[in-house]
Image (cartoon, rainbow, N blue to C red):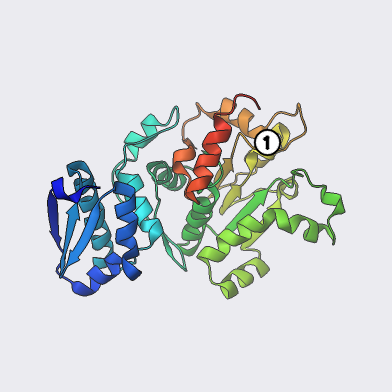
Amino acid sequence: MDTGTLTEVLIEFPDNRLLIDLCGEYDRNLADIEKRLDVQIVRRGNLLAILGEESAQIEAREVLNALYQRLEAGRTVDPGDIDREFRMNAPEETAPGADAQMEMFSGGKVEIKTRKKLIEPRTDAQKAYVRSLFNNELAFGIGPAGTGKTYLAVAVGVNLFISGAVDRIILSRPAVEAGEKLGYLPGDMKDKVDPYMQPLYDALNDFLPGKQLAKMMEEKTVEIAPLAFMRGRTLSNAFVVLDEAQNATTMQMKMFLTRLGEGSRMVITGDRTQVDLPRGMPSGLADAERLLSDIPKIGFNYFTSADVVRHPLVAAIIRAYEGDTQG
């Protein structure tokens, strides 16, 4: 970048302590913004000077001001927060059929309070999804891995539980073999199935203190169980999540959806590109999407590789597989 021909924009931040947090350890937050926008940011007392192209300067100023406002509100700034500010200010890239929901949920701040942390959506699609989870008794989240479908659903479930809106949380997955044979795993049935459920345990541990979670599981106010264990139950006053729903058969999906009881909310998440069912067996997720998409008060939310919030390489890998014409 030839700084000799570029203009300079100054931003003043009145609180030096907050400015230190804004810059980050060894100015790593500034370095992140510089790399993303090809600008140079120089600290001068309580001022930050931004050198670069005008459009990049404007975006850098907006991101820095938004992050400083977070700090003024008593929150922290980490790489995920910087990533969120860039994504939420970027031009929208929505999936087919998602335009209406983006317009409906485009305004207002969306936050999920849990026992351990405050969760904020990092993309517009995530924001629309969270609002749909709060507004609909049955909601679907469909898209590639790493887009936060399950994580956000569990966060909303914890939020509704601690607020008293539901009495329990029930998380389920189909125990489908993805290339490995379930029967050859060591241990009893619980030992064999638990590895399939681990992502659900991980999400709960992010939102609830360990002792409280252990007590809730002991009291059955939190349950994690394979999909097959749902048959014959009526799930009332509960927040129910079916994860990896692309691996449910049509009959299993119908069985699960009809478990919905009074005072309950249900979330179905899945990735249509990662079906592990035997060849020729239709996915219950695809059938549910086809059959239920026109029913009012059922929310369908879609994600793309642009919504991946894991390592940036994950989004690139997903795009490569989506674009492959030889597979």
Where residue 208 appears, x then y in whole percent? 53, 67
| 167 vs 65, nearest the viewer | 65
Badge 1 crowding class, 10 Å Cα cut-off, few under 14, some 14 to 19, many 20 or more, is: many
Is 51 drawn above or below residue 282 in the view shown?
Answer: below
| 291 vs 145, nearest the viewer | 145
Q: Is there any visible trace of residue 201 in the rendered image?
A: yes
Look at the image and tell me in which quarter the C terminus lies: top right
Where residue 50 appears, x then y in whole percent? 19, 54
The quadrant holding residue 276 is: top right
Residue in view at x 71 percent, y 47 percent:
227
Q: Secondary structure at mark 1?
A: loop
The quadrant holding residue 12 is: bottom left
Residue in view at x 65 percent, y 59 percent:
223
| 91 vs 1, nearest the viewer | 1
Q: Is there any visible trace of residue 110 in the rendered image?
A: no
Residue in view at x 55 percent, y 34 percent:
320
Is 217 drawn above or below residue 155 in the view shown?
Answer: below
Q: How many marks?
A: 1
Is 64 drawn above or below residue 313 in the view shown?
Answer: below
Is 55 drawn above or below residue 22 in the view shown?
Answer: above
Where residue 17 appears, x then y in whole percent? 23, 74
Residue 22 is left or right of residue 174, and the answer is left
Residue in view at x 59 percent, y 46 percent:
261
Where residue 282 appears, x then y in whole percent? 71, 28
Q: Which residue in the structure is indicated by mark 1?
A: 275
| 211 vs 192, nearest the viewer | 192
The quadrant holding residue 49 is: bottom left
Disc 1 marks a residue whose amino acid type is Val
